[in-house]
Image (cartoon, rainbow, N blue to C red):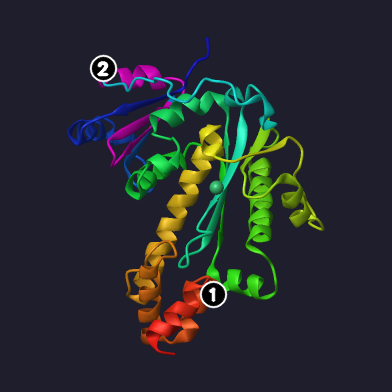
C-alpha cells in the first residue's frame, strides 16, 4: 500500500492557537505567505494556514495529525476516473501519471502581465493537492485561488514566468505574436521545472493547448533548448491532470498579485478583462499620467487603447 507522508487537517483558529502553543519550542522563524506558523519536529513539519488548513509532512505526519482529533478531511477522489477520449492523442492512463503541466493567464487582459507556470505533480501528491483544494480554476474565485496557491507553492516544484507589459509591448512592436510569446514562455518554464526535479523525470508534459502542436513547435524553432519528448497538448487540460490545474492556479495567483501591485502603483482600481469598463479606467490613467503610462500598464496593441484615447479626448 502507498504510504502517504502528507496529511491535511481542517481546523478552527482556536485549535491552531493550541497547536502553536504545543509546538512552541519547535516553531520556525520563516512562515510562508498565508501561513500562521511552521513547526519542525524530528520527523514531521507542520504548517498552519490562515485558511484553517494544517499540513503535516514527513514520516510521522499521520500520527502527529491524529493527536489533533478526528477532523482529518476525507480524501474523496473527485477527479474524473473515466479514461481520456481515445482520439485525444493523450496516454489513456494520463490521470494516473506523474506529469509536468503548464498554463498561462493574462493573455486576454488589457491591464496586467502575462503569467506562465509549469508545475510538477507526481502521482503520490494527488491526494494532498486535492485536500489543499486544487481543482479546475474555472470553478474557483480569485480569493479561493490565492488561498490554495499559497499552500501548494510549498509542496510542488514549479516555475513561474512573468512577462511584464513593457517587455510584452517591446516584443509585440518587433512583430512577435502573442502565440509565439506564449510558446517561448511555456517551453522555458517547463525547462526550469525539469531541471528542478532532475534526476527524476516526469512521465509526460501536458500543455493547456493554445496552439496546435505544429504551430507551437514552429514558434520554438531556433531556440537553444526545445522540449518535445513526451509533450502532450489538450484543451481544458486543467480537467485532465492536476498538474495543469495546479499550474493554472499558481499562474492566476501571480497574475492577481501583480495586478494589485499595478493598481496600487497608479492609484486607480484597474479592471481585469478587456471590456468597455476597462476603456474607462484606461482613459483615467491617460488623464492622470499621460499616454506614455499605457506602455507600463497595458497591452498596447489591444483595441482598448484607441477607445481609451477617444474617451480621454486625445
Ligand atoms: Mg490555458
Residue identified by numbered label 1: 300
* Residue 160, horizontal then vertical, whole percent: 55, 52
Instruction: Give the left or right position of residue 153, taking residue 163 as reference.
Output: left
Q: Position of residue 141 (x, y in %)?
A: 35, 46
Q: Residue furthest bottom?
A: 314
Q: To which residue does mark 2 refer?
A: 70
Q: Residue visible at 43% across and 87% down?
A: 290
> In which quadrant of the rendered view does residue 168 lie?
bottom right
Q: Nearer the viewer, mark 1 or mark 2?
A: 1
Residue segment shown in magenta: 44-70
- From what the image shows, is residue 111 above or below residue 71? below
Secondary structure found at label 2:
loop
Q: Is residue 49 magenta?
A: yes
Instruction: Check the image and name the residue furthest to the top.
Output: 1
Using the rendered image of the protein, determine whether residue 82 is visible from the camera's viewpoint: yes
Q: Secondary structure at mark 1?
A: loop
The foreground one among 188 and 155 is 188
| Residue 281: quadrant of the picture | bottom left
Closer to us: 62 or 29: 62
Amino acid at each position: 500500500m502507498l504510504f502517504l507522508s502528507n496529511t491535511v487537517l481542517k481546523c478552527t483558529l482556536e485549535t491552531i492557537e493550541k497547536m502553536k502553543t504545543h509546538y512552541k519550542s519547535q516553531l520556525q522563524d520563516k512562515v510562508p505567505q498565508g501561513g500562521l506558523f511552521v513547526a519542525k519536529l524530528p520527523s514531521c513539519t507542520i504548517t498552519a494556514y490562515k485558511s484553517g488548513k494544517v499540513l503535516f509532512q514527513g514520516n510521522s505526519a499521520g500520527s502527529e495529525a491524529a493527536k489533533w482529533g478526528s477532523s482529518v478531511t476525507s480524501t474523496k477522489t473527485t477527479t474524473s476516473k473515466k479514461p481520456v477520449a481515445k482520439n485525444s492523442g493523450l496516454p489513456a492512463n494520463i490521470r494516473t501519471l506523474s506529469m509536468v503541466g503548464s498554463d498561462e493567464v493574462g493573455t486576454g487582459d488589457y491591464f496586467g502581465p502575462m503569467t506562465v507556470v509549469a508545475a510538477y505533480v507526481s502521482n503520490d501528491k494527488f491526494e494532498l493537492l486535492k485536500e489543499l483544494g486544487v481543482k479546475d480554476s474555472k470553478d474557483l474565485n480569485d480569493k479561493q485561488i490565492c488561498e490554495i496557491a499559497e499552500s501548494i507553492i510549498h509542496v510542488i516544484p514549479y516555475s513561474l514566468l512573468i512577462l511584464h507589459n513593457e517587455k510584452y509591448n517591446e516584443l509585440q512592436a518587433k512583430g512577435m505574436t502573442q502565440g509565439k510569446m506564449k510558446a517561448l514562455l511555456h517551453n522555458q518554464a517547463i525547462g526550469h521545472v525539469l531541471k528542478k526535479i532532475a534526476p527524476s523525470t516526469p512521465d509526460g508534459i501536458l500543455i493547456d493547448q493554445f496552439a496546435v502542436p505544429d504551430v507551437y513547435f514552429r514558434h520554438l524553432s531556433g531556440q537553444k533548448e526545445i522540449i518535445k519528448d513526451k509533450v502532450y497538448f489538450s484543451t481544458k487540460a486543467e480537467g485532465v491532470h492536476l498538474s495543469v490545474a495546479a499550474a493554472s492556479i499558481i499562474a492566476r495567483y501571480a497574475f492577481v498579485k501583480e495586478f494589485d501591485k499595478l493598481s496600487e502603483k497608479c492609484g486607480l482600481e484597474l479592471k481585469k478583462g478587456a471590456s468597455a469598463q476597462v476603456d474607462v479606467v484606461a482613459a483615467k490613467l491617460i488623464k492622470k499620467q499621460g499616454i506614455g503610462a499605457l506602455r507600463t500598464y497595458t497591452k498596447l496593441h489591444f483595441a482598448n487603447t484607441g477607445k481609451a484615447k477617444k474617451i480621454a479626448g486625445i
